[in-house]
Structures are given as C-alpha cells and as structure tokens.
Amino acid sequence: MANDIGRAMARLSHRDIRTRRRAVRTLFEHDDPSTLEAFEVLLDDEDPWFVSKALDAYRQWAPLTGSEDVATLLRHPNLDVRRAGANLLAALGKEGRVLALKALQDGDGVVQKKAAQSLLRVAEEGDVASLAAHTSPTIRGLAMQHSGLAAPLVIKGLEDESETVRAHALNAILQRNLDTSIEALEPFFLADVHAVSILIWASENQPERLASFASNMNPSHVKALSDHLRKHVTTSQDPLLKGLLEAHVLEPVSRWVLRQGPMEDTLRWSLIENKDLALIERSKLLERLIGRAGEPDVQARVRSFMEHTDDELLKVACENLSTAASELSS
C-alpha cells in the first residue's frame, strides 16, 4: 500500500492528465493525511479540476496535519485558495491564532472576516480590542458583538463612522446592560433602531428619564411594547411598567392589564378612570370584565363609574356589564 501511495504522489506532477487524475483518485481512496503535501503542486494547476481536488484534500486533511498546511493556502496568490485557507482557521483552534492575526492583513474582506471569526473563538488579551480598531467596519462590527470587548470600547462604538458598527455596539450595550447615557441612546431611538430595547434599558437604568422618550413614540413602538409586556411582565411592580405609568405612556400598560386577573384590579380601574388614556382603550378594559360581571365588587365599581362618566361609549360598556350581571343573577 505504501508503494501505491508513493507512486500516486509522484504522479501528481505527471504530464499526462489521465495519469494525474488516477493519482488523485488513488490518494483519496487511501485517505492518508500524510500525502497532503503532494497536493500543493496542484494548487497552481491550469486545470480547475485539479485545483478543486487539491482544495478538497486540504479541507479534508489540513485540520489534522496542522497550521503549516493551512498557512500554505493563506500565502497563495489565488483568492479562492486563500479563502479556502481562511475557512479552515476555526478548525485549528488555538493553533490557528497566529495565522488568523496574519490573515487579518489580507486585502480580501472574506478572508479578513473568516480570520476575525476564528480569532474571536480563541482570543487572548488584547485581540478583541485590536479587532475593534480594525480598518474594516465588518471586523469592527464582529468585535462589538464579542462579550470580551471592554465596555468603554463598546460605548465608543456608538460613535463609529459605520452605521453597522454603531448598530452592533448598541445591541451589545442593551444585551450586556452596560452603563451609558440617555443622550447617547436617544439618536438611535429617534431613528427607530432597537427602540423598544432602549425603552427597556432606560426603565432599568435611568427610569427618571423614560418620560423623555414618551413624546417620540409611534404606533409601532406601542405595539412592540405591548407585546414585550405581555410576554415578559407578570406584575405591575415591574420597573418597565412602573416607568411607563410615571411617564404617562398608558396604552401599552392598558393592553397588558387586559390579560390580567383580579390581582391587578386597582391598576385596571385607575386606567378606566384616567381621562388621559384613549377612550377606546378604557372601553376595552370595561368590556373585558364581562366574564366577571357577576362579582359584587365589579358590580359596585361599574355602578359608581356610571354615575360620574359622561362618555357614551363607556356608559354602553357599563350597561352591558350590568345587563350581564342581571342575567347571571336571574
């Protein structure tokens, strides 16, 4: 078998194309990583088939034979070959760190990106910071997404010339709950970039400033906030919900209350009686009580409310509740 492999390796440089093709097939059949060095000559072959087979060999065996074989690809003048090498960096683990650092200097963006992604998996002190200062916005954006990037550098990313980098920096700040200022986040809110996440951040970090966003909210923000409250908030003591109430952003809170039980009746009735809340939202809160129309406390609150409201829509809702209560008691 050794003789077969040796002959096949030697025949990769043969002038006859059929002989070279048979040699390639023989080496793949034996599946011996030690034969990889013989495929290097095919990387420069004029026939694309041989270049393709050489790259297949490197993809199959280079992660096993080590970094030097991957370096062979990364040094090659052919872009497709270098990209193939960059794709193998991650498979090398820590062994590929030095190669990844060198590959970041490649003039091709794909090679740079693959090198950065590989480096971030095995980054040592200073590596992530160096990526955050890279000339390519794609690389800087990758650095912003890494949990190991120091908070000051992430916050500095909000001022990056690249919109993509700024967006990644903002997302990292919100996900990691980093300390920054409302002023730094406000331009993103006004541009509707992660607007709801910014509101959530503000409620947890600077609730007293939440009101500054209220006047700039649009219907999509209200819907997104309502969805968030429904999925994640279980009590009216939640900081976000309390902050919205204090900022007089009532509609998302009202929609959250619609799905709550008797435990939130105090908040429910305060909203029903609040004239700052849209009339239709107040009416919906009353209508949702239809399943509890027979409860004495609900009946008493409905009668009291009917006595001092002048809004026909709310009166109709109250009358419907009273009718339902009568039918339940009869």
Image: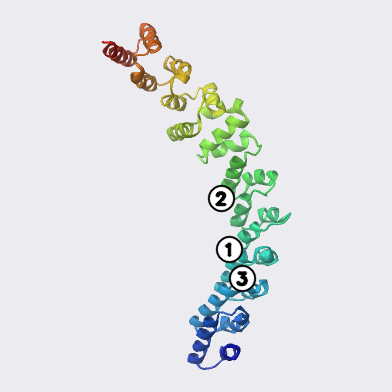
Compare residues 309 and 20 and report the one nearer the observer.
20
Q: Amino acid at mark 1?
A: Gly
Q: Earlier in the sequence, mark 2 or mark 1?
A: 1
Per the rendering, the mark at residue 164 is: 2
Q: Which residue is mark 1?
A: 109
Label 2 crowd bin: few (<14), some (14–19), many (20+), radius 10 Å: some
Which residue is at a point 33% across and 19% down the rendered structure image?
Answer: 290
Q: Tag 2's secondary structure?
A: helix
On screen, residue 300 versus residue 31, left or right, reads left
Q: Determine whether 229 is above or below 76 in the image.
A: above
Q: Position of residue 45 (x, y in %)?
A: 54, 84
Q: Tag 3's secondary structure?
A: helix
Q: Earlier in the sequence, mark 3 or mark 2?
A: 3
Which residue is at a point 58% across and 56% down the rendered structure image?
Answer: 138
Q: Amino acid at mark 2?
A: Thr
Q: Which residue is mark 3?
A: 63
Q: CA distance from mark 2 to mark 1?
A: 15 Å
Q: CA distance from mark 1 to mark 3?
A: 23 Å
Choose mark 1 or mark 3, whichever is in front: 3
Q: Position of residue 153 (x, y in %)?
A: 68, 47
